[in-house]
Image (cartoon, helix red, strand yellow):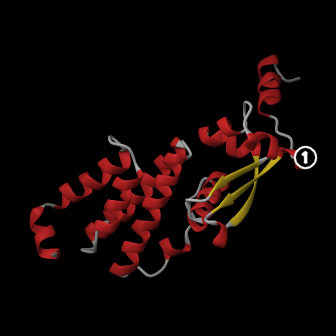
Amino acid sequence: MASEKATGTAKVTAMSFHFSSFLTVHVGPEDSQQEFLLHEGIICARSDFFRRAMNGNWAEKTERLIKLPEDGPETFDIYVNLVYTNTISMLCLTRDLSPERVKDKFQILVQLYILAEKLRDSRAKNDTISVIHGLSYDNIRDGKTLPEGRAIQTMYDGTPEGSLGRSLLVDLWWAVGTKEIIEDS
């Protein structure tokens, strides 16, 4: 027989998978918008943004619809995959490691970090930081590229002062040293 504590925990964490427990998220500008159907319990457990939108007297709660017109559907798709699988699964991370593709990978990861910041999902931010760090370490060791100016500018434009993402990019460049930066120019 299960203890009271175990039974109480099971009651608290049990989720309904009835259709009414799902919500729709429209991502991107209207002309290229994509629609995502997400389980409210799963997404709200990870994101304070979604949790707040689905509580209280907000139109989003009644309509079961959240609109993110300024965000990219591709980035949101990676985020949803992370929430559901606990993995940043981007095919672009495992293929073509040319310097140009590495720059693109950093840009995608920076956009994912910014989205996680906006959605107030600390786990997603930490996971993204880990992948950026790992990709950077591998590229420094192999004599390849670090996040370039475009990724750094995107990070600074999309995050608040004191952001862990900003700090990581500064630390990566500091670790490489001035000599390597000048040689890359």
User: Is 103 on the left or on the right of 18, as rendered?
Assistant: left
* Lateral position of residue 9 relative to residue 149, left or right: right
Q: Residue at x 37, y 55 (%)?
A: 157
Number of marks drawn: 1
Residue 63 location in percent, x, y? 80, 46
| Residue at 68% from the left image edge and 41% from the top image edge | 44
How many other residues sit within 10 Å of disc 1, few (<14), some (14-19) or many (≥20)?
few
Quadrant hosting residue 104: bottom left
The residue under the point 72% across, 33% down is 55
Q: Is 105 located above or below residue 9 in the figure?
A: below
- What is the three-letter code of the residue carrying label 1? His
Element at label 1: loop
Q: Nearer the viewer, residue 176 or 7?
A: 176
Say above or below: 28 vs 62.
Answer: below
Picture quarter containing residue 56? top right
Residue 37 percent location from the top left of the image? 77, 57
User: Which residue is denoted by mark 1 in the rendering?
Assistant: 18
- Residue 21 locus on image (x, y percent): 84, 44
Q: Is residue 177 left or right of residue 109?
A: left
Instruction: Pick whichever, 3 or 144, lies toward us.
Output: 144
Query: At x 17% / y 75%, what residue is drawn?
Result: 184
Name the foreground residue: 80 vs 96. 80
Direction top: furthest residue: 4
**On-image quarter of the C terminus:** bottom left
**In the shown orientation, is residue 162 left or right of residue 46?**
left
Q: Position of residue 101 (x, y in %)?
A: 40, 78
In the picture, the quarter occupied by the N terminus is top right
